[in-house]
Amino acid sequence: MWAFLGGIGVLILGYAFYGRLAVKPLRPDPMREVPAVRLADGMDYVAMPTWRVYLVQLLNIAGLGPVFGPIMGALWGPQVFLWVVFGAVLGGAVHDLLSGAMSMRNDGAGLPDLIGHYLGKLPRHVATFFILLLMVLVGTVFVKGPAALIVKIVPAEMVGGLFGDGAVALLSSTFQGQPVWLWIVMACIFAYYIVATLLPIDKLIGRIYPVFAIALLVMVIGLAVSALSGRLDVPDFTLANLHPKGTPAWPIIFITVSCGAISGFHATQSPMMARCLKSERHMRLVFYGAMIAEGLIALVWATAAQGYYEGGVAGLAAALSEGNAATVVHTICTGTMGSFGGLLAVLGVVVLPITSGDTAFRVARLIAADYLKLPQKKVLNRYKIALPLFAISIALNFIPFGVIWRYFGWANQTLAAVTLWAGAVFLARRARGWCWLAALPATFMTVMTVTYILVESRENGCAGLDPLLGTIIGAALGLAALIAFVWIRPRLSPEPDTAQVPARPSEAEREADKLAC
């Protein structure tokens, strides 16, 4: 119990103190005109109430990541709390704050343009590839994950029973190793994605997302109360590796937990809210604070996953082997909160990932259009980009979810490392003595992502090197990146607090949004 309470305390204190420290070099000025006001267009640059911006930001970043990731990370035991808590305070929240601040100070520029400006053309090309890969993977895991939970809650027998035995047999049959009913649910989610990508941000996202964000918070509070009241057997803290298969925690646990501690995906979402924030003085609340809230969500789910099943981690492993993370979510919610908990599971872990998935595909289409310089005014041009993206995502659904999650986690964390390096350069040019806030977590993320791709098994598409050798190489490359940054830092010219990157969204995004009105 003390580990759980201590984790909550560190997250809260982290927001109160480290968050205040992290925002200090940004010099928030309530009198400075923000992009939402200066570039107001009624489409993307729309000044919204701060509470609404905060909830939309939370909903955009909190999909399956802070739920599925900590559940699977809990297999290593209570040591997962360390990565969730300190990863969120020192890494994830700083990452989100800097990506949002960089965008606000550069007229709402998107992540590829920010990386190109602060790191150069080659990193921009590499980052664009990773962003597109990540967006497709996000869309994929945020289709298959919630679809699996819907099928668990509303099985084929229930739906087919409304139409007769023939319908039950059809929906229960399999196609390419997946139940037909699951394919139908995934098709419905894909259909929603296509529609949602065309609507102005304040017409759908700004109106209904806050409701779903509140549902997520209520669900998490319910689980936290269950833990505090003793209905969940909260484990005592230990650094022992409790993984049933003996899988080493380093560096795999960091990739597995992913969004629960730090997420490159967030940097693709922060610019959307940077275009809606009414004042710079709310940057800490919206960007740093939303990530701290996600850390709390991850901490609660890591605790619930270990404390619900008899036998702790062994019971969790058995539940995952018999089903998947979606099954665990449904079991824990209904077991601790009854039918009401089941409803919250639908709202909190079905709707929320879907609302992150639609923005992922939207971002992917617009980034690809800008990169290829393909105007989106013509409907045919939009199909040229959107259809291949959806086709790739559909094809990925034939790959086991666990493998897709690992690829998603690695791409996600790699993009986070690149974004942090861009943030380090941003700070070095605007508040030179504060660049360590981003440079240190960027170095750690570089070491971790390189080590993972080297030591993870070949069956999962990685090099499969000896863990010690892979760690040495990863540490060497991370140190080299830090030395290179320290070397170039004095040569970076100071940058004023005025916009240095052309206003974004681009003309392609503006034309696409005009057609959506």
Image (cartoon, grey):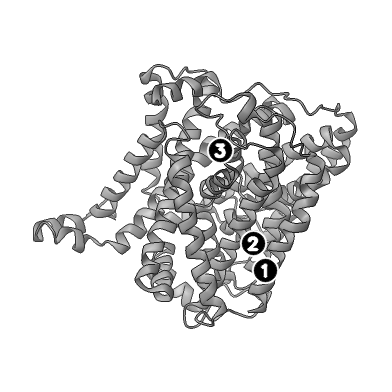
Q: Name the residue under label 2.
A: 84
Tell which of 171 and 49 is nearer to you: 49
State the separation of the CA atoms marked 3 and 2: 30 Å
Is disc 3 in contact with disc 2, using a CB cutoff of under 8 Å?
Answer: no
Q: Label 1: how many residues lie within 10 Å, few (<14), some (14-19) or many (20+)?
A: many
* Farthest-out residue, right: 490
Residue 110 coordinates in the image, percent (x, y): 61, 31
Q: What element carries label 1?
A: helix
Q: Nearer the viewer, mark 3 or mark 2?
A: 3
Left or right, residue 59 beside residue 180: right
Q: Which residue occupies 62% across, 48% down?
A: 413
Q: Which of marks 3 and 1 is in front?
A: 3
Q: Which residue occupies 64% across, 80% down?
A: 236
Is disc 3 in contact with disc 1, using a CB cutoff of under 8 Å?
Answer: no
Q: Label 3: how many residues lie within 10 Å, few (<14), some (14-19) or many (20+)?
A: some
Q: Name the residue under label 1.
A: 7
Tag 1: residue type? Gly
Q: Which of marks 1 and 2 is nearer the N terminus?
A: 1
Res 186 seen here: yes
Q: Which of marks 1 and 2 is in front?
A: 1
Is the residue 484 above or below the residue 398 in the image? above
Is disc 1 in contact with disc 2, using a CB cutoff of under 8 Å?
Answer: yes
Q: Label 2: how many residues lie within 10 Å, few (<14), some (14-19) or many (20+)?
A: many
Residue 103 image-quadrant placement: top right
Tag 3: residue type? Met
Q: Earlier in the sequence, mark 3 or mark 1?
A: 1
Quadrant location, the C terminus: top left
Tag 2: residue type? Val
Q: Name the residue under label 3.
A: 48
Is the residue 224 above or below the residue 217 in the image? below
Is the residue 180 above or below the residue 337 in the image? above
